[in-house]
Image (cartoon, rainbow, N blue to C red):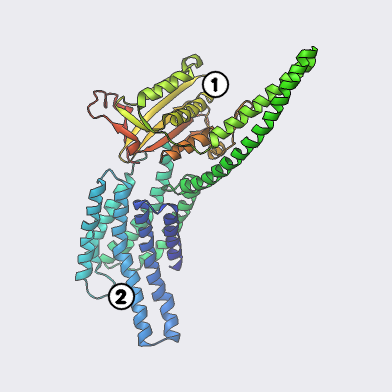
Amino acid sequence: MLFVTIVLWSTSLLLLLTDFRKVQIRWLALVTFFGGCGGVAVHLDESVRPAWDASLHTPAANQMLDVLQAFFSLLNYYGLPYAFVLSALYFNPFFLPSMKRHYAALFLLIPPLLTFALSPAYTPQKPVMHMWMALWALPYILAGSWLIASMPSPNLAMRTSNYLAKLAILPPVLFATVVGYILPAFGVYGMWRYNPWFIGLAFLLFLVAMFKTGFLGVRLYIERKRLDSTLRAITSGTTILHHAIKNEIGKIRLFSEKMKSEAEEKGLADWYEDVRVIEEASNRVLAMIRKVQGQTKDQKLIEEPFPLRSWIEEVLKSLGLPSRQIQTDVHGDSAIVMHGDKALLTEALTNLCNNAMEAMPQGGSLTIRAHLGKRKHVLEISDTGIGMSPYQLKKAVDPFYTTKGGGLNFGLGLAYCYQVMQKHNGSLTLYSREGEGTRAAMTFPARRWSIVPSSADLGKEGKAWTQSAL
């Protein structure tokens, strides 16, 4: 059972390292910690105790071992159901508002405390009163399982991630409930020895999800740290490069002007044309480095309120979509007001729409849809274009990665969008499959959108709004 403890406590540590600030992550880390405590209690009883009996067979040593075993065993029995139902309440915020969840944490603590206070003294043979435990532990586990199973997926990018998370969490917890609470209440003991199989498979799912699709934000956190570090290095490098090249280009242009004047005075037409080509080339180099710096420099927000729908329509109008045989479908209410840097967000949305149009060379459909949540709101831009391969999707936001050739395409458009969303305390998520199009989700914190309740338009578009818990 030491394997179970190592796996579960390693999972706790990984969860806490990813995003300790999230309450639901902390509660889930407690679930895996309390689960690992059961493995410690078994290891103490089956492995440590025989060794102590052979070498340290003293009353004091036995008493200390009994206390340790009781401590870890009771943490497992009482802590697991309680932490699990609390983690589920925070993962599915639709069930209770934030303030009521705090009261629920106190209220749900009453049954475990009463059971502990009324139970007989701990013994290794009968650590708890299983029938009493089942009366509250079973409802806690079932309620928590239902909350996690019904956890919403606000966009397609999170659907696979949430599905793997549910597979990794629910089977081992439900199995542990059956063998740890239900069967012992009817006199069937020892079935917990099969726990390592379920926990091992769940841990493999956790690792696969973490590095492939994301497990409750774990992969996103790792990639965000890597990308942030890369962008900081690029910002510093391009600033130095811009100044160096700008100075040298200035010299080229100065002497080019002198050479052009001399060629014009002497009537050297070929010489004049050659110098003009040099000037144009230097101007192109300067334009290129300016664009690179503009898309990588640290942006300062100039915030202002502006209506969501009219802003989207302005961006689409500037792109000249009708001439490109691309249909648009905008789902968003005129009552929504955005709060942010309009210029930066316009550039980000323009980049995403341009990517969508370039993915539909034969025409297609561009849809912009707003999802309204309790804590976060999402603006999704989807197309019916060629889509991306898994490799392209993984590399899409990396600076200087591009599938477009020539011109001023440096592969910085999506990296720029990522930076803009980070500045607005949001995120950018991409979902795509080859031949099925691409969906880009711009996720904003709730405070970035305000809604006018008195608007007659509110909700008139029916399915235009999707309630999501983000």
Q: Where is residue 448, by image quadrant?
A: top left
The percent coordinates of residue 441 (x first, y second) are 43, 34
In this picture, residue 352 sits left or right of residue 73: right
To which residue does mark 1 refer?
A: 361
Res 411 seen here: no
Measure the alpha-carbon separation of dots 2 and 1.
Answer: 72 Å
User: Which mark is nearer the camera, 2 or 1?
Assistant: 1
Q: Is residue 68 above or below residue 111?
A: below
Residue 343 occupies quadrant: top left
- The disc labelled 2 sits on which kind of residue? Gln
Residue under label 2 = 125
2 in relation to 277, above or below = below
Packing grade of label 1 (10 A; few <14, some 14-19, many >=20) is few
Residue 238, numbered label: none
Judge by depth and name the residue closer to the eye, 50 or 58: 58
Q: How many marks?
A: 2
- Mark 1, secondary structure of its residue: loop
- Please, which residue is most extreme toward the bottom here? 58
Task: Specify whether 308 is left or right of 257.
Answer: left
| Residue that appears at 43% across and 82% down | 52
Residue 193 percent location from the top left of the image: 40, 66
The C terminus - image quarter: top left
Q: Would you identify the image quadrant in which residue 365 lies? A: top left
Q: For this view, does 389 lie left or right of residue 146?
A: right
Residue type for callout 1: Pro
The image quadrant where one finds the N terminus is bottom left
Percent of width and height locating residue 5: 43, 65
Which residue is located at x 36 percent, y 65 percent? Answer: 191
Q: Nearer the viewer, residue 88 or 396?
A: 396
